[in-house]
Amino acid sequence: MNDWEQLRKTCLHCEQCELCKTRHNVVFGDGNPHTPILLIGEGPGEQEDLTGVPFVGAAGQLLTQMLDIIDLDRSQYYITNIVKCRPPRNRDPHPNEQAACMGYLRSQVRMIRPKIIVCLGRIAAMKLIDPQYRITRQHGQWVNKGGFWMTAIYHPSALLRDVSKRPDTFDDLMSIRQKLDEVMGNQN
Ligand code: URA
């Protein structure tokens, strides 16, 4: 078994925090691990918990459509979450739950070695970019941290609730496309 499969197997049996007691499935991640771009959300919702696949519910479907605008589908990126098990009633994952799960994400990042990391929403941005991150002010900005180009966009659930945020997200998506072309050496 290779390292990725070993990690996945360990994660699928994880009991390191209380979320294991209420989950139906661990949601390890989905997409292409041989990719320059990694997207990281907050934690599985109901549909993700039931299927074991990230971003398949209403917010996930919107995200898929948004990424389609910049010609990205799941064969071209990898997508996962800060916590791999659903927090009950979709509450924010507690700091101890995030901490218990970080080892899996760190290993995923180490094995994927992406060039770009996109945080989906405030929780991921605060955990991965800056604990003081203000999504309304800082979304779409790029930082180079630990050798990765990192940015955050509004969480697709926020875009479902508030359509007035969508034009900003459109600009952020264009910027992600541009950065991806840049790091891949595409000039067009
Ligand atoms: N929201 C998230 O942050 N992650 C998912 O997988 C689904 C919804």
Image (tube, rainbow, N blue to C red):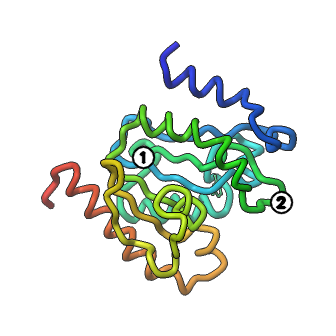
Q: Residue at x 52, y 53 (%)?
A: 40
Residue 62 or 34: which is nearer the viewer? 34
* Residue in view at x 66 percent, y 53 percent: 43
Which mark, residue 44? none
Image label count: 2
Q: Position of residue 4 (x, y in %)?
A: 50, 25
If the picture is divided into quarters, which one holds ligand 1?
bottom right
Q: In the image, is residue 11 above or below residue 91?
A: above
Q: Which mark is residue 77?
A: 1
Tell which residue pokes out farthest to the left in this image.
187
* Quarter occupied by residue 174: bottom left
Identified by mark 1, the residue type is Tyr
Q: Say which mark, if any, is on residue 89.
A: 2
| SS under mark 2 | helix
When the figure is inspected, residue 163 is found, relative to residue 130, above or below; the finding is below
Q: Nearer the viewer, residue 101 or 33?
A: 101
Please identify the quarter of the rendering in which residue 91 is found. Answer: bottom right
121 sits left or right of 49 in the view = left
Residue 104, by quadrant, is: top right
- Name the spot of residue 61 as percent of width and height, x first: 59, 60
Mark 2 to mark 1: distance in Å? 28 Å
Residue at the outermost top position: 1
**Looking at the image, which is closer to me, 112 or 33?**
112
